Image: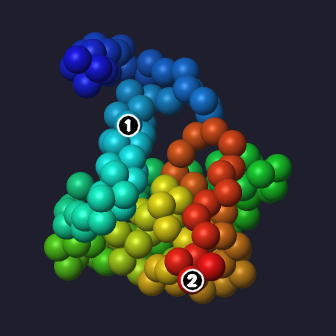
Amino acid sequence: DGRARLHLALRGAPPGARFPWYGPPMSAASMATARLMETWAHGQDIADALGVRREPTARLRHVAWIGVRARDYAYLVRGKQPPAEPFRVELAAPGGELWTYGPEGAAQRVTGPALDFCLLATQRAHRADLAVRAEGPDADAWLDIAQAFAGPAGPGRAPKGA
């Protein structure tokens, strides 16, 4: 019922409409993407609790996109100024293709499997347990604070070996 009501609200929204949320108001497209991200992240919580491995799919692109898009928010919610320089993010998608965000020649880069980036950005796994890598000090700092969700900064997960 909730999914059907959200679908109707988003489809019926006039162009340019903004929806209030915990962070800044969101467009209909961003609201839909954020709900997909939250559903995926909380589904991961359930899979982890049950010891089940979910097979990643191309739908992770939505989660990756919001993780990249929320870069500046991760800084601002912590009272920090985001870097002015753009980042390049290159993620190996579940189907083998490369998902890219940001200018090709950017000095600050993040690379790795899309699944790992999504687990990091939704704070479902600690950076030390993932194959996401940074080139450049600003990209490195971002991976320590990345969050794809609105609201206050969370503590994240402890490394599995901790």
Q: Nearer the viewer, residue 4 or 24?
A: 4
Q: Is residue 17 visible?
A: yes
Mark-to-mark CA distance, 2 and 1: 31 Å
Q: State the image coordinates of residue 14 (x, y, percent, origin top left).
A: 36, 14
Q: Quadrant of the N terminus?
A: top left
For image coordinates 44% across by 22% down, the residue present is: 16
Way the structure is coloured: rainbow
- Indicate the secondary structure of the residue bearing disc 1: helix
Callout 2–callout 1 Cβ contact below 8 Å: no
Above-or-below relation of 134 to 124: below
- Indicate the secondary structure of the residue bearing disc 2: loop
| Left or right for 60, reference 76 | left
Q: Quadrant of the C terminus?
A: bottom right
Q: State the image coordinates of residue 95 (x, y, percent, origin top left).
A: 17, 73
Which residue bears the numbered disc 1?
A: 35
Above-or-below relation of 21 to 111: above
Type of amino acid at the residue the image marks with label 1: Arg
| Left or right for 15, reference 19 | left
For image coordinates 73% across by 64% down, the residue present is: 83
Which residue bears the numbered disc 2?
A: 161
Type of amino acid at the residue the image marks with label 2: Gly
Above-or-below relation of 152 to 147: above
| Left or right for 131, reference 84 | left
Q: State the image coordinates of residue 115 (x, y, percent, origin top left).
A: 35, 69
- Using the rendered view, name the quadrant where residue 47 is placed: bottom left
